[in-house]
Amino acid sequence: MRWLVTGGLGFIGSNFVRLVLRELPDVCVVNLDAMTYAGNPANLRDLESDPRYAFVRGDIADADAVREAIGSGVDAIVNFAAETHVDRSILDPEAFLRTDILGTHVLLEAVRERGIPRFLQVSTDEVYGDVAVGASREDAPLRPRSPYSASKAGGDMQTLAYFATYRAPVLVTRGSNTYGPYQYPEKLIPLFVTNLIDDEPVPVYGDGLQVRDWIHVEDHVRGILHVLQRGAIGEVYNLGGGNPRTNLEITEVLVEGCGRSMATHVRHVTDRAGHDRRYAIDTAKARALGWSPRIAFADGLRATIAWYRHHESWWRPLKSGDFLEYYKRQYGSRTEIAR
């Protein structure tokens, strides 16, 4: 079989490519990636000589690039390509509309026109918006509150509309906050770990009591693969780790794991605009399909800290140049707040 993976140089996409090539010897992977700031060739450099792996540089919003990547045909498309960081969506919402909505539309048109047997849209629990109590099931209303989550909700709705209108063979997964190897250091866990390794402070938004459910990337990509192979066409599946923690609790574990001090290394700063207080998803549907997370949160977090300690050559080049400009723009003007 031949699968097209879009955004395969990114964090979750590259871990998915590794999983497929490691465990499915009858599958070849074509990776279509635009190589934006988070699309890092180093994520899959060791696979470049693998005869079952091919890379095509291109934008999913470019129909010609998508046609080139599909070539004579593929048996499935798994769409990881997305602008993903809420903070960046607040600074530049238009880029999110192009990739997450227009790009998804271009892929869906290719599915419809070429008769591709399977399309999986990788989405996020953030489309459900703030969840004060309980947990969101797949049929819950979508209430996105940031440009990022709104763009992802738009891609989801297009995907499901193509099933309703054209009977396109689509699936959607909505994952919770994901952590692990190869995550670009703008996100909470890799940003904090790499800052702490360098004996630098970490910026905690507001009181740090925002709640997120965390899933290790290996469990997440196994869930995506499981849904791709066994999910019912036209359905949505939540993939969560079952590890709800406040951002402050996560910070405490990371600070301790890096041998630093909360008193000297944590800086509470003014909160993000429109910051959702709590996310929570019900994963019963995916579990009924036969998937469940395997990695205990404490074990996964320890392993992640160790990975960044042992892979400085991977992340140090990323925390320079444009990243430093972004970091200064994002955090430099934020006011430190008393605790």
Image (cartoon, rainbow, N blue to C red):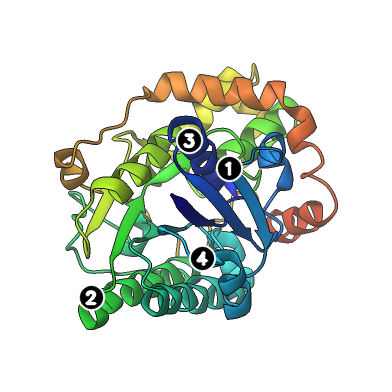
Residue placed most toward the observer, 292 or 147: 292
Q: Percent position (x, y) of residue 292? A: 26, 33
Q: Whole-Å distance between the Cαs marked 4 and 3?
A: 36 Å
The structure residue drawn at horizontal position 64% and vertical position 50%, both measured from the top left corner, is 54
| Amino acid type shown at disc 1 | Arg
State which tag comes first along the sequence, 3 or 1: 3
Q: Whole-Å distance between the Cαs marked 1 and 2?
A: 30 Å
Please tell me whether residue 295 is drawn above or below residue 329 in the rendered image.
above
Q: Which mark is residue 52?
A: 1
Q: Whole-Å distance between the Cαs marked 2 and 4?
A: 39 Å
| Amino acid type shown at disc 3 | Leu
Q: Are marks 2 and 4 in contact (CB under 8 Å)?
A: no
Q: Which mark is residue 167?
A: 2
Q: Whole-Å distance between the Cαs marked 3 and 2?
A: 29 Å
Q: Which numbered disc, 4 or 3, marks the residue closer to the eye?
A: 3
Q: Secondary structure at mark 3?
A: helix
The structure residue drawn at horizontal position 35% and vertical position 63%, both measured from the top left corner, is 127
